[in-house]
Structure formats: C-alpha cells, structure tokens
Image (cartoon, rainbow, N blue to C red):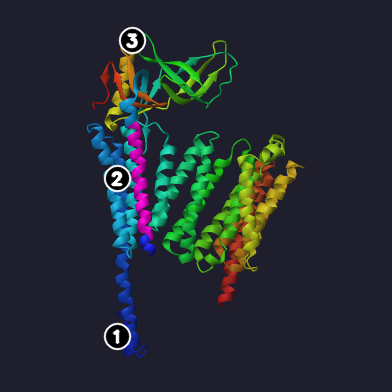
Amino acid sequence: MNNKRNLILLLLLVCLQLFVPAKMIYDHEAILNKGKVFKFKTAPVDPSDPIRGKYITLQFEANRFYTTRNAAWYSNQEVFATLGEDKDGFAKIANVSTSKPESADYIKTNIDYYQNSDSAYIVLNFPFTKFYMEESKAAPAEKAYIDAARDTTSVAYAKVSVLNGSGVISNVFIKDIPLVNK
Amino acid sequence: MIKDLPELIEANVISQETAERISDYYHQKKNKEPNRLIAVFGIIGAILVGMGIILIVAHNWDDFGRTTKSILAFLPLLLGQASCAYALIKKKEQKVWLEASSAFLFFSVGACIAMISQIYHISGSLPDFILTWMLLTLPQIYILNSSVASLFYLIGITYYAGEVGYSYYHSKEILWYWLLIIGIIPHYLKLLKNNAQANWAVLHSRMIPISLIIALGTCGYDNEELLFISFISLFSAFFLFGYLPIFRKTGKSTQSYSSLGLLGIIVTLIPLTFDWIWDNLFRKLPPINELVMTPEFISIFITTCIALYLLLRHDHIPASNRLSIIKYSFLVFIAIFLSASISPKLAELLSNLMLLLIGIRIIRQGIEEDHLGILNYGLLVLTTAILCKFFDTNISFIIRGLVFVGLGIGFFYANYMIIQKRKRNEQ
C-alpha cells in the first residue's frame, strides 16, 4: 500500500522534474521564434561557472538612460526599458518607466545605479548577459574581441530576441562573424 | 575465532552445539558484509557518474543543434527516473538500488537544467539555479526514503546560503535557506528514531550543525556584534540536543553535538575577552523598535527560544556531569551582553570569567573521569583565556614570563597528578 502511494508520488515528481525544464525550453523557444531581434553593441569577458560551464559575460554599451536630476530612481528598482534603434541599427534605450509599456518592445529589468549629478542618468542591468560557449572557445572569443576593439571600424554585438519583457541571446558577432555556428 | 573452535571443544570450554552456533553466526555475518561493501561502492559509483555527467554537460557541445542538445539534456534525467521507478517496484528491499538511483537522479536533474540554461544562454544567477535544482530534488528524499539525496540536498542548500548570504549584500533570498532546511528535518528525525548510531544518521548529525553554523553567519548585516548571542544560543542548543534521550544509547552522536556545542561556546567567547568588541557596542545599536526587525535580532530570538525549549523540556543531563552547568551558557551570556550597556569593562570582565569557569569545569570533569584528554582540553581553555588577556593589556614582560612558566608547570603538575592517581588505583 505504502509502496503504491510512493509510486504515485514518484510519478508526480517525474512529471514535475520533466515539466520544469520543458517549460524553460518552451518559453525561450517562443521568444526566439516570435520576438523582435535587436542588435546590442557589447564587450565580451570570459568567466566560468562551476556547474554550467564556460561563458562570456556581455557588457552592453547602451545601458545608460539620461534622466532628470533628483528623480525617484534607486538601485535594484524594477523598471521597464523600452527599446529603440539608433541610426546604425543598434539597440538603444528609448525610455525607462516603472509601469509596463502598452505597445513597443521592452525589457523587464532593474536599475544598477542612479547617477544623480548635473547630467543625471541611470545605468540598467540587462537580464541577458551570459553567453555559454564550448570551454575551449570562450577565452579565444574574448581575445578576438580585444583584437577587434583595436580596429575602431569593427564592432561586436549580440543578437537578442525580445518578447513580452524577456530577451534571449541567439548569437554574438565580432566583425559580423558569429561566435557560434548554429 | 572459528579456527580456535576445535581446540576449545577439546578442552571442554564450550560444547559442540555452542561451537556450531558460533560458527553459524560468523558465517552469516560474513555473508552480510559484502552487501554493505556493494552498497557503498554502488552509491559512490552513481555519485561519480552523476557528477561526471554534470562536467561533460559543462563542456557545452557547440557542434550539436538546439534540438539535439535538448534531447541529450533529458536522457540522463529519464534514465535516472526509470531507475528510481524500477528500484521502487522491483528492488524495494535493496536499499543500495534506491540510494544509487536516487543519487544518479539528483545529478541528472542538475545536468538537465544546466544544459537548458546553456542552450538558451539563461543569465540567471548560480543561486537561482541551485534553488531550482534543490526544490526539484527535495521530494526524492521522502518518496525514495533516500539519505544520499538528503545529504546532497543539504550540501546544495548550504552552498546556496553561502552564495546568497555572503556574496550578495542584504539579500532577502537567504530566507529560502531556512525554509529549505526545514524540509530535511522530518527525514533526519526519522533516521534518529530508527537508529541514531547508524551511518546515515551519524553523517546527518555531523553535517546539519555545520550547515546551520554557516547559515547563521549570513544573518549578520549592520549589527553583526549581536550574532555573538545567536551563536552562543545555537551552540548551547547543540549542547543540550546532544543529551536528548534519543542519543543516550549512542556515544557518537552525543559527543558530536555536545562537543561541537561546547567547542563553539568556547571559540565564540575568545574574541569577547578583548575590550575592543565591547567598547561603543551599545552606542552603535539602533533604537529598540528598529532593532527587533533586524535579521540579527530575529536570529537571537529563534536560537534562544530553541535553546530554552531544550533546556526546559529535555533536561536529561545527569547531575553528576560537571559540564551540565554549560547548559545555562546562553542565559548567562545574554546577561553578560546586557551588562555591556552599563559598563563595557564589566562585560569584558564577565566574559573572561565565564571562559575561565568553563575551563575549570572541564578540568574538574577530566580529573573526576580520570581522563587525560578532557583534563588537557580544560587546561588549554584556561590557558587561552589567560593568553588572550595578555595580548590585550600592557603587562610587563617579567610578569608575562612568570605566568607562562606558571601555566607550563600547571600542565605538568595536573597530568602528573592524574598519572599518580592511576598508579595508586592500580596498586
């Protein structure tokens, strides 16, 4: 009897253990398939995660939004960043608000810090900063970027699909060459 | 023993029947032993394979497409789940099957979500990842009655507490740890009730207090000094917990909890024998209405309530035990701490006195039990208490030198006395 109950519970656990990763896949596939693609200028750095492996951290250039002095912004505040594009076609922050934008593409994120000075601005954290790579490739990718950075005409950027406030990185390009061939 | 049986029968020490019974007993015992060995190696094997899969996943196979990688992510998970189901249906009498499958499933859950995090470049922090992993594996402990899963879960949540509590300033996420550790308690109590001396129970009895000590440190924010009270209360609770009747039959667990508690109280008291901790202590603290909402105060409240409960309801320490006085440590220490509001010097003096008294108690216990280890432990505590005072104040070198010599002679004398006493008893 006890064993039968345990079997039913195990079945429920199996479903839960399968459901959570499956839901992760489903949600991210939806963003990749239906989301609008933005190109974020970035700088890759190479750290490592003990369990999930090597990745490069992306430091986005367009993380600053100029605002007024003595505004009510604070660190870690949850905000919605509306995205736009500059004249070269790279992503920029068009607006930051505390309420969800009705239309337009936005990212739900938080404030890193608020620089309350003459030219006041807020710096945003992006919810997509890790780009996982095969362990042997992460360090050369960082070097490729450093080399590319010396050449002022070349840029590194991440292609990010954005949908309903979330973003998923699909690839990172240095001089228009993708880091991962998929 | 079996070899000696014919000789014993011949010498009429034991009968033929007794010899056969002895022989049967050892044969049966021998048959049981390989099982235990297989169990240990089976479980270690499953753990290694599981960890290996995690590392192989961490390599991040760029060459495979998203679909292939997703399917590969689910393979070990499905294998682990099938193995657990098989163990429950067919091999429920064999603990090793359950434990090994459970260990494998534990790691394959981690590998699966790690791989999906890679595929979609999910930037979630490491603590978030561990939290999801631990929540998904917690039910395994109860459904499969698995102590391996429970130990790894304990390691996982402790790592989580360390990452969240010590790396991120003022993170409220640490509350998750306290909820997660409650999840393990029913399993641990069941282990203790079955047999507190069994290997799994002993392993839990060692690791749970370590986890709690690490996590309690994360409660320190702006008023870290208050944590001294929390730690003394926690260690007093350990000390009292070790004397519960459930441990009475077993030497090991009692020693592990009560010795850890005693050692913890001593180590926590050492820095408090210095004056710089006490100076300005109460001037820095916020007003009482703000103080009661701080994590430090809440930790004091909870640890002290637990220690008080154990003191009032489960006072089973034999009165003959000289160390039984240690059980009041947390109450005495709270009084000392409050005395700092009147005079920091008084609190410093009382802390020194408390450490000295504990040292003397341990020495007396050593003498009464005729135990050189305990005696020297007590002497060491006493010496530490005196040495700390030494570095704290400007005392002339001559006096310091004389005290050192005195302490050294004290060590010799006390050990000599015990050895002499033993010799007299032998005669």
Q: Is residue A20 magenta?
A: yes
User: Are the residues flagged by discs 2 and 3 in contact, CB closer than 8 Å?
Assistant: no
| Left or right relative to B291: residue B32 | left
Residue type highlighted by circle 3? Thr
Q: Chain of mark 1?
A: B
- Mark 1 / mark 2, whichever is N-terminal: 1
Q: Which residue in the protein does label 1 denote?
A: B6
Q: Is residue B51 above or below residue A26?
A: below
Neighbor class of circle 2 (other Cα within 10 Å; few <14, some 14-19, many 20+) is some
Q: Which residues are magenta?
A: A5-28
- Pair 1/2: label in front: 2
Same subunit, tags 1 and 2: yes
Q: Position of residue A126 (x, y in %)?
A: 43, 24
Q: Which residue in the protein does label 2 denote?
A: B52
Disc 1 element: helix
| Left or right relative to A23: residue B65 | left
Q: Which residue in the protein does label 3 denote?
A: A152
